[in-house]
Image (cartoon, rainbow, N blue to C red):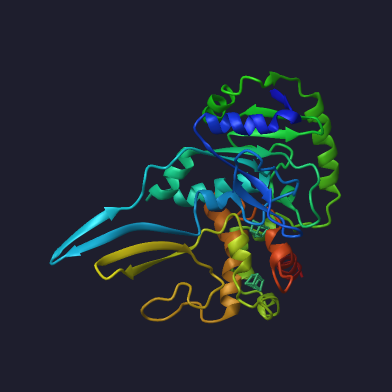
Amino acid sequence: MKKLPISKLNDFFSAVSKAGNKVYLPVDIGEGKGADYKLWSEGVELSKALNTNRSAKDFFFPQTENLFELKMDGKNIDVIDTRTEAEDFVVFGVRACDVRSFEVLDRVFLANPVDTYYKTRREHGVIISLACTKPAHTCFCHQMDVDATNAGGDIQTWMTDDALYLEALTEKGKALLSKIDFAEDADEKAVEAQKAETKKALEALPLTMPSAEIFEEKELLKLFNSPKWASLSESCLACGTCTFVCPTCQCYDIRDFDTGHGVKRFRCWDSCMYSDFTKMAHGNPRVSQLERFRQRFMHKLVYYPANNNGLKGCVGCGRCLAKCPISMNIVKVAKSLAEEATK
Ligand code: SF4
Ligand code: SF4
């Protein structure tokens, strides 16, 4: 384990940047508006907020991207790859829940057929995580098998009042940390004390998820046909906010735009909560908001774990709890289904 004094945090970002990386870190975006990732440059300060409004997913799976262009000349069509060589970048301050979200996304985008857009960014990006010390009342990561005190990533870090402790976990992380010549060797005493305090805080959090057994594949039909979906989905506004702030949501749409002398193909995030999601030539297989709402929660709680050796499709970040305009959230849904299933 390495350590550097807090007074050298800026020197750390500077050294990582000089090592050829763009460095992104959580930065306050305005009074009462929380934090989001911004590019570091001299004078940019790390936020003290627990987490960012938008997750670090954006760096690897951006909200919109131009996939390629087609140029037409008579009957000739040229396919133009619009990608430029991805730059190396570092995302600092990623919390354990969001680090886990990459495991969820990797199983979608890196499975065959591999999404080369996502893969290139994963290869060029280094994730430096930051352990939590003061989880919020909306957090329930510990109920979703995430350890907020060992956040993971390429380098995991812990911040105390006077120092940043760093531990490289991957080859990429080790290569980067070896370039920080002012980081000193350190023992784990302060980190272990911090972990013990945080674990106590996590255990005292108010949100509890029902047992995962309720959501096993063998219960699928019972859950799918639960009468609870009607009352749960009744007030959903179909705004899609829960899907847009979620670090594990990965649905997208692809659209072509006629430029007058060719076509530009874009990919942009979509939401299973929208009425035109999955719309096909024959119409839409999910015609009601109940069906769309059920799809989102069944995917996170049942379908994804069933297809991925039990890996949960929700990482307990709490963003959907904090942002939903009708105060609906995955914990409420899970509890309601569990109550009905165990009647
Ligand atoms: S944020 Fe809330 S209201 Fe909006 S789509 Fe999600 S569950 Fe429905
Ligand atoms: S479903 Fe909600 S709590 Fe779970 S990962 Fe998505 S935004 Fe976070």
Q: Quadrant of ligand 1?
A: bottom right
323 w.r.t. 18: above or below: below
Q: Quadrant of the C terminus?
A: bottom right
Asked whether the viewer can see residue 310, the reply is no
Quarter holding residue 7:
top right
Query: Which residue is at the far front?
Result: 43
Q: Residue at x 58, y 34 (%)?
A: 154
Q: Is residue 98 left or right of residue 115?
A: right
Number of numbered discs overlaid on the protein picture: 0
Whether residue 87 is visible to the viewer of this picture, yes or no, is: yes
Q: Residue at x 57, y 31 (%)?
A: 16
At x 56% / y 25%, what residue is drawn? Answer: 174
Rendering coords of residue 175 (x, y %): 53, 25
Q: Say which quarter of the image contains residue 288.
A: bottom right
122, above or below 319, in the image:
above
**Residue 341 to residue 44: above or below:** below
**x and y, in percent, of residue 341 in the image:** 71, 68
Residue 41 in picture, x, y percent from top left: 60, 40
* Residue at 73% in and 20% down: 186
Judging depth in this view, the residue of 304 and 176 nearest the camera is 176
Is residue 218 found left or right of 258 in the rendered image?
right
Q: Nearer the viewer, residue 112 or 339?
A: 112
Task: Name the quarter where the N terminus is drawn.
Answer: top right
Give percent across and percent down for residue 10. Answer: 67, 33
* Quarter assignment of residue 332: bottom right
